[in-house]
Image: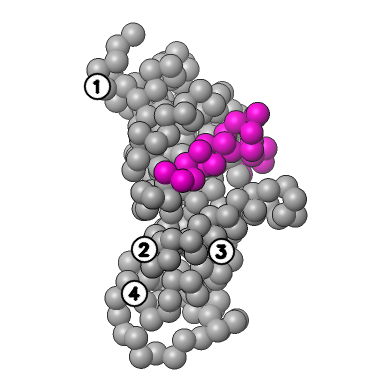
Amino acid sequence: MTGSRNRKRPGGRALKQRVLEALKTGSETEALERLSDIPPRVLVSPLFGALHHMEPGVHWTAVRAMGAVAAELARQDLEEARVVLRRMMWNLNDESGGIGWGVPEAMAEILARHEGLAREFVNILASYTREDANYLEHEPLQKGLLWGIARLAGARPGLLKAAGPDLAAFMQARDPALRGLAAHAAGLLDMEEARPRLQRLLKDEAGIPDDLGGLLPSARIRELAAGALERIDRSGVVS
């Protein structure tokens, strides 16, 4: 992150407000430029607070910014970045007393941007899809998780192969966003075992909401399923 280093750094409520105003630009690049004089470790807390913002533009800019800030923090102090991810894990733990809105996608965004952290924490992220592990039961959290799985699958597909069997089950979810995200991720992971369920989704006319951070290349599940099958075919694995 670059920019002027001479501005006075705000704290407390003023810092939260400044971060929020930067995120309202809807641009990760512009937001980080406006906040470039603030150290990554200082930005982490107000970004956490912005993850659950109701306005999609603010939420997704916060997710992307958190990924960039935590990755930069990892380059400066890897252990501090690990603390950020452990804080996210705690937020997704029932014992935390919170809900963890925005946390799965922010966790995945960090892992997508830093290979070392990805190798350390990818199994934790995948465990949230598993009923015998840390399964997330709330559908809004599941949507954030599958967004994160698809995001990380696009960036580092080789690290997420173990998530395949559990990911396929979401293709039968009631929420079309879950079905669409699962189908898209299956294609990115070249999941041959998902072929039967993807083929059934070729008749799924449901649309996908447009509040998913621009991740999905299509607005209909059948199109996402077709794209996933084409990718699996191109991978050289044929049924």
Q: What amino acid type is highlighted by mark number 3?
A: Phe
Label 4 environment density (alpha carbons within 10 Å; few <14, some 14–19, many ≥20)? some
Gap between marks 2 and 3 measured at Cα: 20 Å
Is residue 190 at least partly visible in the picture? Answer: yes
From the viewer's perspective, is residue 123 above or below residue 227?
A: below
Gap between marks 2 and 1 measured at Cα: 36 Å
Gap between marks 1 and 4 measured at Cα: 40 Å
Is residue 212 at least partly visible in the picture? Answer: no
From the viewer's perspective, is residue 137 above or below residue 30?
A: above
Q: Can you tell which of label 2 and label 1 is closer to the viewer?
A: 2
> Circle 1 sits on which residue?
234
> Circle 3 sits on which residue?
48
**N-terminal label among 1 and 4:** 4
Secondary element under disc 4, as helix, strand or loop, is: helix
> Circle 2 sits on which residue?
75
Secondary element under disc 3, as helix, strand or loop, is: helix
